[in-house]
Amino acid sequence: MAAGATSQCTASVQGTGSFSSAVTWSVAGGGTITSGGLFTAPAAAATITVTATSTQDATKSGTASVTVQASAPPQPVVPQSHHVVLVMEENQSYATVVGATTVWPNLNALIAQGALPTNYYADSHPSIGNYFMLTTGQLLTTDDNSTQVFDVDNIARRMLSNGMTFRVYAEGITQGYLGGNTGLYLIRHNPFAMLSDIADDPTVANQVIWPFSQFATDLANNALPEFSYIVPDVNDDAHNGTPQQADTWLQTSVVAPLSGNTAFQTGGDGLLIVDFDEAADSDTTNGGGHVSPVLWGPIVKAGYTQISSTLYQHESMLRTMMEALGLPNPPGAAAGAPSMTEFFVQP
């Protein structure tokens, strides 16, 4: 029986002539038993002997052995969130970000407030495969110039089929834009524009793809969707601009506005993820090199630095985001990737 559970014991007294059928109950090894035979198991695993002794003849008794099994500890989970926000930064190695407080002061402050995976690696060089891994669980292509539309299982398809609200907020484009590179916007940084569920349906694209200015409007109207994907332009994501510019933009345009939203305050369920697509090209460890995503929000362990030796990659982040959104069976490599439960406050 399980630790702490109860079980009603019974005893049958047999004999000839006139005799009492009453018994007294006792236990050895742990737990308790009432005069009526109701046994309560101890809180820990044990082997218990329950004895029923005749009240008429104390030399007569019967015993039963009870094995008490310890309750399995609860498995860690990713808490549910109704406001998951993913922001992508570009081409920065772990060593050039974490601890580089003169270059990334705001992001390092966010690390101190949130959770830092220290054993996280991108999947590929160049960029595009990493973006698809984060959304489909597959690399799909390593051609950064590709604008091919892919009809594969993906997080957008799951959200659409479940009636979930989600938006892509991208700098440098207009609502519903499905074209290629324009100005400081690169389509390869927006994989949703190359997934058939959106790219082949202008009506859906018009609902999903928005200029970044809409992010502030939605926050002001308390209309932040369940999933937000933020695409900075190449000057604001550290691709072309300086890391200091990316750091300032991230703080003023994303982190500070979210801090004023109730979902990201005490008692809320907001989750902000700042991820890097790949490390410097010279770092090919595990495919795309060592990078430093940051998780932040009231459901994240504050000031937590990874203590496990688990290897995480973008497929783990995809699985983790889908678990936070309550979407089962993540696609592609995300299905077998380790979930990032260790970074979250447990219920």
Image (cartoon, helix red, strand yellow):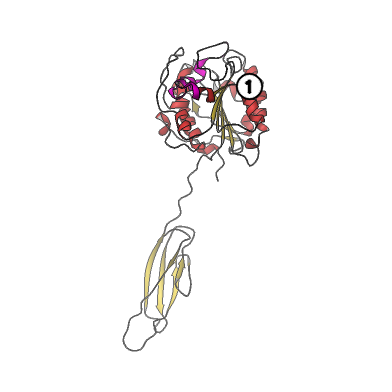
Q: Quadrant of the N terminus?
A: bottom left
Going 66% across and 32% down the picture, which residue do you hit?
259
Q: Look at the magenta stretch and give its main secondary structure.
A: helix
Q: Which image quadrant for residue 256?
A: top right
Q: Is residue 310 left or right of residue 256?
A: left
Q: Considering only vertical position in the picture, is 272 above or below 209?
A: below
Camera-nearest residue between 300 and 67: 300
- Residue 224: percent from left, percent from top: 60, 31
Write the residue at 31% across / 86% down.
16
Label 1's element? helix
Q: Which residue is mark 1?
A: 213
Residue 215: horizontal and vertical position, in percent?
62, 25
Q: Quarter of the image holding residue 271? A: top right
Query: Magenta segment range?
Result: 183-203
- Residue furthest left as drawn: 16
5 vs 303, left or right, is: left
Q: Where is 53 relative to 158, above or below?
A: below
Looking at the image, residue 327 lies above or below residue 4:
above
Residue 151 can be seen, yes or no: yes
Say what amino acid the circle numbered 1 marks: Ser
Categorize mark 1 by other alpha carbons within 10 Å: few (<14), some (14-19), many (20+). some
Q: Is residue 101 magenta?
A: no
Q: Is residue 182 left or right of residue 336?
A: right
The verdict on residue 199 being magenta is yes
User: Which x, y percent locates residue 211?
Assistant: 59, 20
